[in-house]
Amino acid sequence: AGTLYIVATPIGNLDDISQRAIKTLAEVDLIAAEDTRHTAKLLSHLGISKRTMALHDHNEKQKAQQILQWLEEGLNVALVSDAGTPLISDPGYALVSLCRASGAQVTPIPGACAAIAAVSCSGLPTDKFQFVGFLPAKSKARQEFYEQAHGTGITSIMYESTHRIMASLDDLKEALGAQQQVVLAKELTKSFETFFSGTVVELIAFLEEDPARQKGEIVLMLPGKVADKTDIDPEAIRLIELLKADMP
Ligand code: SAM
């Protein structure tokens, strides 16, 4: 039987593709792509000419069946998305879950992922974090979401679309206060790559100062809430004080 390769592609800088990814794309029988025209540009840049088929959110279930059949017939297939790692806020879940359930071989060809690139340079704690994909589209849902994410106590990594970023930051301010720390990573690996870390109001001011700064691809990161002393059970504090008083 054949193998399904989940191949990461660049998130901006075309050099960010592994030797193994290039080799795999050159050797498979077929490439399933989120957008075949987009992938055609990457393939042409790599000097690879290969049969591609579209696999996106709207046809994924049906195409997955077809791809599984090809795998069972012994063909090797690569899955790519427009940028970064497939399935990470991108199509592929229906295909991979079907292949796993059917016992087909699925292998990662790892590479760029905006969330990981962003958090690794954010300066925020990376020992534990949650990636939550795209933020909710509605204001109220976003505010609730921010509060909940902050309350987990760990770093949250979020994707936000450029036309919603200002409204989204207003909600962040509303939910967690003007002084909440936040980190924005923009246009990673591209010419105008930017990291900004500061309070929500500072970030809003930075983006308003030059509206061009509001354009481009954005990863937003929020540190987790640090439990303050008042969160500790008062009874526990009282016991500790009693014990301390008894110590020599
Ligand atoms: N599969 C991709 C990955 O591995 O990161 C994510 C695809 S998702 C449809 C697109 C979103 O990812 C963008 O809206 C943005 O939030 C984020 N993103 C992708 N490329 C980026 C980049 N170069 N800089 C910052 N964010 C990026």
Image (spheres, rainbow, N blue to C red):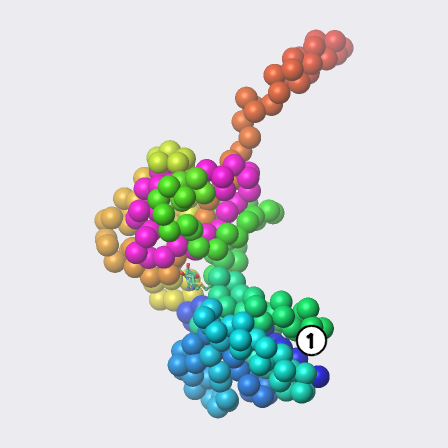
Q: Is residue 169 left or right of residue 117?
A: left
Q: Is residue 234 above or below residue 16?
A: above
Q: Could you tell me residue 70's position as x and y percent?
A: 62, 85
Name the residue that disc number 1 marks.
104
Which residues, given as a range, are shown in magenta? Answer: 147-173
Residue located 68% across and 68% down the image: 101
Res 107 → quadrant: bottom right
Disc 1 element: loop
User: Considering the image in quadrants, where does the C terminus appear?
Assistant: top right
Question: Of the residues shown, which amino acid type is indicated by label 1?
Answer: Ala
Residue located 37% across and 33% down the image: 177
- Badge 1: how crowded within 10 Å, few (<14), some, or many (20+)? some
- Residue 57 among those drawn in magenta: no
Residue located 37% across and 51% down the image: 137
The extreme bottom residue here reads 49
Q: Could you tell me residue 79's position as x and y percent?
A: 55, 76
Q: Main secondary structure of the magenta part?
A: helix
Q: Decide which of 65, 43 is in the foreground and name it.
A: 65
Q: Visible in this render: residue 8?
A: no
Q: Is residue 154 above or below residue 77?
A: above
Residue located 39% across and 81% down the image: 37
Q: Is residue 101 left or right of residue 88?
A: right
Q: Could you tell me residue 2's position as x and y percent?
A: 67, 83
Q: Is residue 88 above or below residue 168?
A: below
- Residue 153 among those drawn in magenta: yes
